[in-house]
Image (spheres, rainbow, N blue to C red):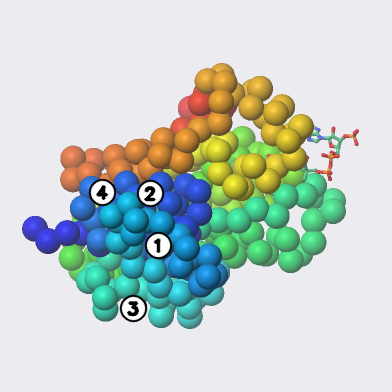
Amino acid sequence: MSARVALVTGGTGGIGTAIVRRLAKMGYKVATNYRNEEKTKTWHNKLKGEGIDVLTVKGDVSDPESCKAMVHEVEQKLGPIDVLINNAGITRDTTFHKMSYQQWTDVINTNLNACFNVTRQVIDGMRNRKWGRIVQISSINGQKGQYGQANYAAAKAGMHGFTISLAQENAKFGITVNTVSPGYIGTDMVMAVPEEVRAKIVAQIPVGRLGEPDEIAYAVAFFLDDKAAWCTGANLAINGGHYMGW
Ligand code: CAA
């Protein structure tokens, strides 16, 4: 069988880079999107230096037309997309009574509407070929809520609603759809939380530390395996014990 093609949105970010690295090492042909060309060049060269070749394609996940062009380019260059990881995400943290409409829509568009924009472009192909893997990278804060994140928590909770509906619609086409909900991982996004606030958050994590990006990538890889074919509509919480929902 020729190598499967995986598109990881937001692949240049903290968790995204770990997913790209892991999938490339597993033999997938991996693509990701970028918005900032300069930053991406440096990132690309760093991975090349590790022997990892990734296709980088210009694309804004919050824009449906851009996603259409992005998926077309990936499929032209690598072949049909078998695996989609909806990972791109941003924060615009502030308490709701201070939140602007822009802060609300920026987060909903990039974190939740992106799932429509990208997945809509790949779902027909997966259904026709009778195989596919889709994973949403949500968040612990979509499960438990978070002071200062009404926009982010709403988007992240919405991602799992998306997962469980798509999982039902596409199960008989050999497509699994799952969610991974990371807790606080040592990425730039989490390090941007003010230090004293972050220290209080870390103190609530039973394992006693922030997570590592590859601890999330490891879980993503599990869902992609052929042997995980019966696992669909799941939400796998990986958070050092920070939130233990049912
Ligand atoms: N619970 C209850 N009260 C809280 C609180 C909490 N968790 N956090 C803050 N408060 C209270 C403060 O004690 C303070 O009360 P007083 O006015 O009575 O003193 C009040 O709320 C205002 O707090 P701040 O001074 O912190 O307000 P601010 O406007 O400067 O900042 C904030 C608010 C932006 C929400 C800031 O507290 C913050 O950054 N919090 C962290 C949010 C967070 O966890 N973001 C996660 C980013 S990483 C990520 O999202 C990845 C992932 O998936 C996990």
Q: Which mark is residue 45?
A: 1
Does residue 219 lie above or below 189 as drawn? above
Upstream in the sequence, badge 3 or badge 4?
A: 4
Estimate the spatial distance between the alpha carbons at disc 2 and disc 1, rounded to whole Å: 17 Å
Badge 3, how many Cα within 10 Å: few under 14, some, many 20+?
some
Q: Which tag is nearer the camera, tag 1 or tag 3?
A: 1
Does residue 100 lie above or below 75 as drawn? above
Upstream in the sequence, badge 3 or badge 2?
A: 2
Q: Is mark 2 within 8 Å of ligand 1?
A: no
Q: Residue 242 location, x and y as percent?
A: 57, 26
Which residue matches tag 4?
25
Disc 2 + disc 1, Cβ < 8 Å: no
| Amino acid type, mark 3 | His
The residue drawn where x is 32% and y is 46% is 22
Q: Residue 122 location, x and y as percent?
A: 33, 68
Which residue matches tag 3?
72
Q: Which tag is nearer the camera, tag 3 or tag 4?
A: 4
Q: Residue 135 location, x and y as percent?
A: 38, 50
Upstream in the sequence, badge 1 or badge 4?
A: 4
Q: Which tag is nearer the camera, tag 1 or tag 4?
A: 1
Which residue matches tag 2?
19
Q: How many marks?
A: 4
Between 59 and 47, the one lying in front of the other is 47
Estimate the spatial distance between the alpha carbons at disc 1 and disc 4, rounded to whole Å: 16 Å
Between 17 and 10, the one lying in front of the other is 17
Q: Which tag is nearer the camera, tag 4 or tag 2?
A: 4
Q: Residue 76, can we see it?
A: yes
Which residue reaches farthest right? 98
Badge 2, how many Cα within 10 Å: few under 14, some, many 20+?
many
| Amino acid type, mark 1 | Asn
The residue drawn where x is 73% and y is 61% is 103
Estimate the spatial distance between the alpha carbons at disc 3 and disc 2, rounded to whole Å: 22 Å
